Image: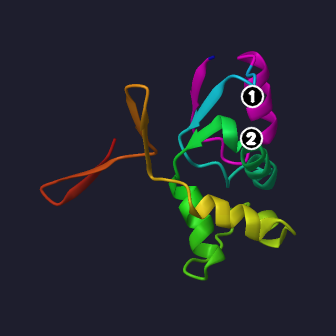
Amino acid sequence: MAIYAIGDIQGCFGPFQQLLEIIDFNPGKDTLWLTGDLVNRGPQSLEVLRWVFRHQDNVEMVLGNHDLHLLAVAEGFGKIHNDDTLMDILNAADGKVLLDWLRCQPLMLSGHGYAMVHALTCCRNGVSTRR
């Protein structure tokens, strides 16, 4: 059994699948830790979300800023940007199921002696720096 951490898939389903082949990911015994930003930027956000949802028994994940943006837009608290690639999810027949599941994902994950978050913003003297 292996645990793999993968970050920022951002709707790039093809490269994500290629990476899983390279590491020889076996959903029957391996676990993926996904560091957020499953969606947006790439052309296949819906496919990424569907794959992770189907394999949720072998995936641990945290939400990233693009995932949170999708949820905000879906709830009417954000607006689609010109370069967003989220409409397929919002218009999908299974979109509500996927969004309801995504809404339940954590911001932080811990286990096996590790902790994982998508990104950490620190403030020093009122200046925000990204780490």
Quadrant in which residue 80 is drawn = bottom right
- Residue designated by label 1: 27
Number of other residues with Cα within 10 Å of mark 1, as a class: few under 14, some 14 to 19, many 20 or more: some
Query: N-terminal of the two: label 2 or label 1?
Result: 1
In the displayed structure, would residue 27 be above or below residue 52? above
Image coordinates of residue 23 in percent, x first then y, are 70, 17
Q: Nearer the viewer, residue 89 or 56?
A: 56
Q: Residue at x 73, y 22 (%)?
A: 25
Residue, far bottom: 76
**In the image, is 102 to the left or to the right of 63?**
right
Residue at 69% across / 44% down in the picture?
56
What amino acid is labelled 2 in the image? His
| Residue bounds of the magenta highlight | 2-24
Are the two marked residues, 2 and 1, in contact with CB atoms closer than 8 angstroms?
A: yes
Q: Give residue 66's position: percent from left, percent from top.
A: 57, 57
**Whether residue 55 is situated above or below residue 105 in the rendered picture:** above
Horizontal and vertical percent for residue 40?
A: 67, 55
* Figure quadrant of the N terminus: top right
Crowd tier of the residue under label 2, counting other residues whose Cα lies within 10 Å: few below 14, some 14–19, many 20 or above = some
Q: Pick whichever, 61 or 10, lies toward us.
A: 61
- Can you identify the residue that label 2 sits on? 55
Q: Nearer the viewer, residue 73 or 30?
A: 30
Q: Amino acid at mark 1?
A: Pro
Q: Is residue 93 left or right of residue 118?
A: right
Q: Position of residue 59 (x, y in %)?
A: 64, 38
Please check the rendered image and state whether residue 37 is part of the magenta-colored stretch, yes or no.
no
* Secondary structure of residue under mark 2: loop
